[in-house]
Structures are given as structure tokens and as C-alpha cells.
Image (tube, rainbow, N blue to C red):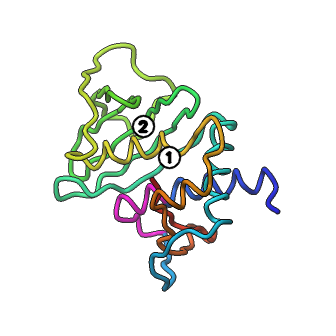
């Protein structure tokens, strides 16, 4: 049986890997040779538990490499699973000006920035907003995925399995073994 701390660590590593997997990878994951398959009962229970523990933990860090418009965009920030909001810096290769993004499940607020780090507090003004469109914008898909990794109660593991959740592969991320899961 995994302890709460181990599940939280698994959840944090899983979040980084899932976001990296959606974004095409950042070069730090080592792929193991196993193909997609349905989740086992214990894998479905782990997915359910990790999402619930993320919610209880309230906040987490995110990092992703997202292919968009012919470039790999780097996204680094944080998510609050209780309020379903996030705040991140988006670095676009070859551009002097990058973007700060705040988001919730419906809207992204964008702010230009030239800083190399995510400011501790978002700027007070200068934000433009737009609806999130995960079908047209891969960055929006990653933003929504990050919010979905925390739920206020454990999901029914059997329903996760019936909903098409699958184990894609095992990898090592910065030396930590992780499992990549595609879920409903």
C-alpha cells in the first residue's frame, strides 16, 4: 500500500510527465518499450487517488513542452486545484517577448513579458483575455489538462476503466519511474 506522501510524489511526477507527453517531450524522459493497454484495477485506483490527493494538496507546479505553430513552447508555472486556476510563463523560442498566462476552465488571460522567470505575483493590469479552445490550441489543451489532475473526491476506478482510460507506457523522468496514462 502506498503512503500519502508517496502518492503525492507520484502525482507531481505524473503531472510533469503527462504534460510533457502531451507536449511532445522535453528531452528528459526515457521511454520504456511497452504499448498502450487498458488500465488495471490498481492503476485506475491509483489515478483516482492521485487526483484526489492533488486536490487535497491544493497547489502544484507544472512544466510542459508543447508543440505549437511549428515550435516547441515551454510552459512553467503553478496550478491551484481547489480554485481550478493556474498561472504560468510561456516561453516561445526565438521571441524576445514571451507571455504570462492566467487561466481557469473557460478563459485564458494573457500578458506580454520580457522577464526570464515567472513573477511571484501576476501584474495588476495589461491583461487580455480570450476563451480557451483546447481543440484548436494545444497550449489550451495542456492548461485544461493541468486543471483536471485534481478532483474534490476520488473518482470511481471502475468508471475510469470503462471510460477508456489506458496505460500508454512507463518512462523515467529525471530518474524517477513514472507511468503515462491517458484518461477520460
Name the mark on residue 62: 1
- For the point 37% across and 35% down, the residue is 115
Quadrant assignment, res 90: top left
Task: Determine whether, in the image, residue 121 is placed left or right of residue 74.
Answer: right
In the image, residue 181 lies at what x, y percent? 50, 63
Task: Determine whether, in the image, residue 169 is placed left or right of residue 133.
Answer: right
Question: Is residue 184 depicted above or below 172 in this figure?
Answer: above
Contact check, label 1 and label 2, Cβ < 8 Å: yes
**Depth check, front residue: 15 or 45:** 45
Question: Is residue 91 depicted above or below 127 in this figure?
Answer: below
- Quarter the N terminus occupies: bottom right
Residue that extends furthest to the bottom in the rendered view of this protein: 33
Question: Is residue 144 depicted above or below 161 in this figure?
Answer: above
- For the point 45% across and 61% down, the residue is 164
- For the point 39% across and 19% down, the residue is 123
Disc 1, SS: strand
Instruction: Report the number of numbered marks.
Output: 2
Disc 2, SS: strand
**Is residue 45 a member of the stretch shown in magenta?**
no
In the image, residue 21 lies at what x, y percent? 41, 63
Name the mark on residue 87: none
- For the point 69% across and 55% down, the residue is 9
In the image, residue 52 lies at what x, y percent? 65, 43
Residues in magenta? 18-28
Question: Which residue position is annotated with label 2?
Answer: 88
Amino acid at each position: 500500500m502506498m503512503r500519502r506522501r508517496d502518492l503525492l510524489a507520484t502525482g507531481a511526477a505524473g503531472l510533469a510527465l503527462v504534460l510533457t507527453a502531451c507536449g511532445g517531450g522535453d528531452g528528459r524522459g526515457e521511454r520504456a518499450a511497452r504499448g498502450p493497454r487498458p488500465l488495471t484495477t490498481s492503476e485506475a485506483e491509483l489515478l483516482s487517488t492521485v487526483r484526489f490527493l492533488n486536490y487535497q494538496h491544493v497547489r502544484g507546479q507544472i512544466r510542459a513542452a508543447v508543440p505549437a505553430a511549428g515550435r516547441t513552447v515551454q510552459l512553467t508555472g503553478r496550478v491551484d486545484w481547489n480554485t481550478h486556476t493556474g498561472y504560468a510563463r510561456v516561453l516561445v523560442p526565438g521571441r524576445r517577448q514571451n507571455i504570462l498566462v492566467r487561466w481557469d476552465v473557460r478563459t485564458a488571460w494573457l500578458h506580454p513579458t520580457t522577464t526570464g522567470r515567472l513573477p511571484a505575483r501576476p501584474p495588476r493590469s495589461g491583461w487580455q483575455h480570450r476563451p480557451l479552445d483546447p481543440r484548436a490550441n494545444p497550449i489550451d489543451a495542456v492548461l485544461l489538462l493541468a486543471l483536471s489532475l485534481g478532483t474534490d473526491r476520488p473518482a470511481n476506478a471502475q468508471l475510469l476503466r470503462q471510460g477508456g482510460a489506458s496505460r500508454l507506457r512507463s518512462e523515467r523522468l529525471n530518474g524517477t519511474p513514472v507511468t503515462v496514462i491517458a484518461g477520460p
